Amino acid sequence: MELLQPLHLPPYPFKISDQNGQLFIFDVIRKKNIVLTPEEWVRQHFVQYLIQHKKYPKSLIKIEGGHKLYGRPNRSDIIVFNTAGEKILLVECKAPSVSIDQKTFDQIARYNMVHKVNLLAVTNGLQHFYCSVDFNAGNYQFIEELPDYK
């Protein structure tokens, strides 16, 4: 079952509840139960990975932040800020069944036209891609590992 399938991220002790046959997962960032979809499963794992393994402060993580692109509303899966309030990481999450392809990279690149973040991550829970963006040079490069929070 894709919903709770093991991912290529460490397992975490999530609070999962069943409400009338619908599964919910407790989101420590939004501090509420969220409908458990395959994409949410990946998002919650990645948030815990950022907090527990990469030491990003929970208080600096925002989930599903809204923004407008070409006048249309969009939502960014995960945005991380530094203590000065500047965006430092943009993460796009997909369900495990969704392959990471050019369309996914195009999507995060479009979102980053709004956010202008130097560090990007794309994940479906099974594959993770990290990218460092240099706006001055107008280029980007894939990096092996997501840096720890500094």
Image (cartoon, helix red, strand yellow):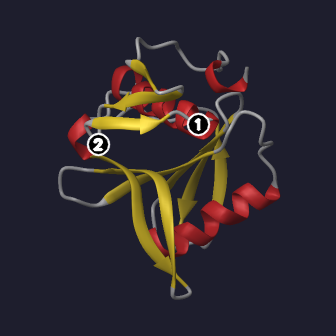
Q: Which of 96 and 35 is in front in this view?
A: 35
* Residue 74 marker: none
| Relative to 103, 28 lies left or right | left
- For marks 2 and 1 on the same chain, the one whose residue lies earlier in the sequence: 2
Q: Is residue 25 visible?
A: yes
Could you tell me how far apart the alpha carbons at marks 2 and 1 are, in whole angstroms?
A: 16 Å
Quadrant showing the N terminus: top right
The quadrant holding residue 51 is: top left
Q: Which residue occupies 58% across, 36% down? A: 37
The quadrant holding residue 138 is: bottom right
Label 2: state its secondary structure: loop
The percent coordinates of residue 48 (x first, y second) are 41, 26
Give the vertical position of 14 relative to 112 (above or below). Answer: above
Q: Which residue occupies 45% across, 29% down? A: 24
The amino acid on which the numbered mark 2 sits, given as a three-letter code, is Arg
Quadrant showing the C terminus: top left
Q: Which residue occupies 66% across, 64% down? A: 107
| Relative to 101, 122 lies left or right | left
Q: Nearer the viewer, mark 2 or mark 1?
A: 1
Q: Nearer the viewer, residue 91 or 150?
A: 91
* Residue 30 marker: 2
Give the vertical position of 66 relative to 94 (above or below). Answer: below
* Residue 37 marker: 1
The quadrant holding residue 94 is: top right
Label 1: state its secondary structure: loop
The percent coordinates of residue 27 (x first, y second) are 35, 33
Q: Are marks 2 and 1 in contact (CB under 8 Å)?
A: no
Q: Can residue 150 be seen in this view?
A: no
The percent coordinates of residue 78 (x first, y second) are 44, 49
Q: Which residue occupies 51% across, 88% down? A: 71
Q: Which of 81 and 100 is in front in this view?
A: 100
| Relative to 117, 70 lies left or right | right
